[in-house]
Image (spheres, rainbow, N blue to C red):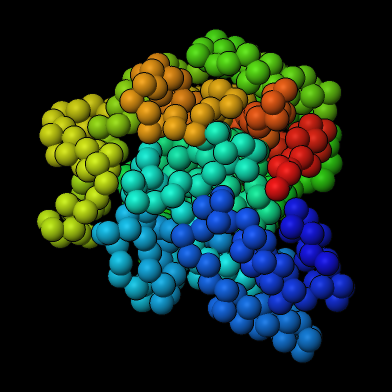
């Protein structure tokens, strides 16, 4: 039997030992999707026939004694803005993007090279922005259908948290790996900008977009990240150097690690549940021999104000290059308003945003002369309601509080690791994020693994 909430390492061990086959693992996931996803709405399309064929190929290779990697036979799923050969890439716009892809996105190709089994494409907000198209059933948070599922990579967050796949690809332009990871009680890694190729991934705002991995544990996130990271000639923005080793150190001794936090930043606009859980996590890190120190980050407010116009301008360029004028009339009203706004943004605002980006980037990264990582919330409130971004009654200050913990680090390009750090009395997940200097994914994953082992929050799963 294949346990839907097993770790990738546990599943790989079962497959290697012959206690289960890749076909059995894929079929178990497909059966669970068929049973649950009619309500959860996490998949845009399930590739049942293809997934079973891929799994059978892994079983045949194992039987022949061929060397296989750590995710061979592991069922995963892909956010629906990545090209998947011979499949439609929907980008959350059901009436705009209907063309069949001729090749795989680089991240999909690398998962195939690693012998992962691709279960399907995952639902997302329209254009990877804030709301789902009116004709798309939004994914439902498995911890409560009244809860927010986390914006753009919502399908990825819901599918992973619900045990419908062992990991997923997400993208993050303003928090869309970190929001659904935090809201659904899973882990997610937004790597350093350029660590993972965006080749074959439809852009929202290319200067802010990052591709990453989402899974139920930090170790699983690391294994998937290792499979997709690295240079890519198809992506001119991809960093040329090879990725660092990312296998998480198993030691929970964090001696020599210095972790900074900004008390005022942590508390501003943040609910008590989140503040208390983040402070408790700092206490646990101290017990693991990390040094905790107070720092002050540069003021992030200007960047949160500039994120919308920058995203809007870049979205116009991205979509005008790929759609006709007639197709643009088929977007939903929320995404259409973004494009309309972007066409009216003064050039001076874009230039000023780049200046503000550099000021924050230099100031924030200067902190890492004295610390190894920075800790703060990833989501400002536990128990955000399902219609948070689609309700006209949502206060503007709540939107600002949401973005202030994520958007600055899209502008700066720093790697961010989100993981669950507790639950409210109503079983609403609470999360934190660890942010490092550029190229410090291995450090974040080490700290995250150690912290996760003592918090225990990653071991809790929704009852479905």
| Residue at 24% across, 41% down | 333
Choose between 401 and 396: the one closer to the eye: 396
Residue at the limit of the structure toward the top, as seen here: 264
- Image x and y of residue 449, in percent: 75, 41
Q: Give the side of residue 260 with respect to residue 137, left or right.
A: right
Most foreground residue, 264 or 163: 163
Rendering quarter of residue 377: top right
Q: Give the vertical position of 52 relative to 406 (above or below).
A: below
Counting from the top left corner in percent of width and height, residue 426 is at 69, 26
For the point 79% across and 86% down, the residue is: 63
- Residue 113 can be seen, yes or no: no
In the image shown, does 449 or 294 lie closer to the viewer? 449
Q: How many numbered marks, from 0 up?
A: 0
Say whether residue 9 is left or right of residue 118: right
Which image quarter is the N terminus in?
bottom right
Does residue 267 appear in this view? yes
């Amino acid at each position: 039997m294949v346990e839907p909430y097993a770790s990738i390492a546990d599943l790989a061990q079962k497959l290697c030992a012959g206690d289960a086959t890749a076909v059995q693992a894929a079929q178990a996931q497909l059966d669970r999707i068929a049973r649950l996803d009619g309500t959860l709405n996490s998949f845009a399309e399930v590739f049942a026939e293809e997934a079973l064929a891929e799994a059978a190929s892994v079983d045949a290779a194992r039987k022949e004694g061929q060397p296989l990697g750590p995710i061979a036979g592991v069922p995963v799923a892909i956010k629906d803005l990545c090209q998947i050969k011979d499949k439609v890439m929907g980008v959350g716009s059901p009436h705009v993007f209907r063309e069949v892809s001729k090749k795989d996105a680089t991240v999909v190709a690398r998962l195939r090279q690693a012998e992962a089994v691709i279960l399907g494409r995952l639902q997302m907000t329209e254009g990877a922005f804030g709301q789902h198209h009116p004709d798309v059933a939004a994914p439902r948070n498995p911890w409560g259908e009244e809860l927010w599922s986390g914006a753009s990579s919502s399908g990825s967050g819901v599918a992973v948290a619900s045990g419908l796949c062992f990991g997923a690809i997400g993208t993050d332009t303003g928090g869309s790996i970190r929001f659904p990871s935090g809201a659904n009680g899973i882990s997610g890694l937004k790597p350093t900008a350029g660590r993972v190729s965006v080749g074959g991934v439809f852009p929202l705002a290319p200067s802010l977009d990052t591709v990453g991995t989402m899974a139920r544990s930090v170790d699983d996130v690391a294994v998937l990240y290792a499979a997709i990271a690295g240079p890519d000639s198809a992506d001119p923005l991809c960093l040329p150097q090879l990725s660092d080793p990312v296998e998480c150190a198993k030691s929970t001794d964090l001696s020599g690690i210095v972790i900074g936090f900004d008390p005022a930043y942590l508390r501003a606009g943040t609910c008590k549940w989140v503040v208390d859980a983040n402070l408790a996590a700092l206490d646990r890190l101290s017990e693991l021999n990390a040094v905790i120190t107070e720092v002050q980050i540069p003021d992030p407010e200007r960047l949160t104000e500039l994120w919308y116009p920058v995203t809007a301008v870049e979205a116009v360029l991205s979509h005008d290059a790929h759609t006709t004028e007639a197709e643009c009339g088929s977007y939903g009203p929320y995404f259409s308003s973004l494009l309309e706004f972007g066409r009216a943004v003064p050039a001076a605002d874009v230039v000023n945003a780049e200046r503000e980006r550099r000021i924050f980037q230099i100031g924030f990264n200067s902190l890492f002369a004295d610390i190894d990582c920075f800790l703060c919330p990833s989501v400002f409130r536990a128990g955000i309601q399902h219609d948070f971004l689609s309700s006209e009654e949502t206060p503007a200050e709540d939107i600002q509080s949401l973005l202030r913990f994520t958007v600055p680090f899209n502008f700066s390009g720093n790697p961010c690791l989100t993981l669950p750090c507790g639950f409210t009395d109503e079983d609403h997940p609470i999360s934190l994020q660890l942010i490092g200097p550029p190229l410090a994914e291995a450090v974040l994953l080490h700290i995250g693994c150690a912290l996760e082992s003592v918090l225990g929050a990653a071991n809790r799963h929704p009852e479905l």
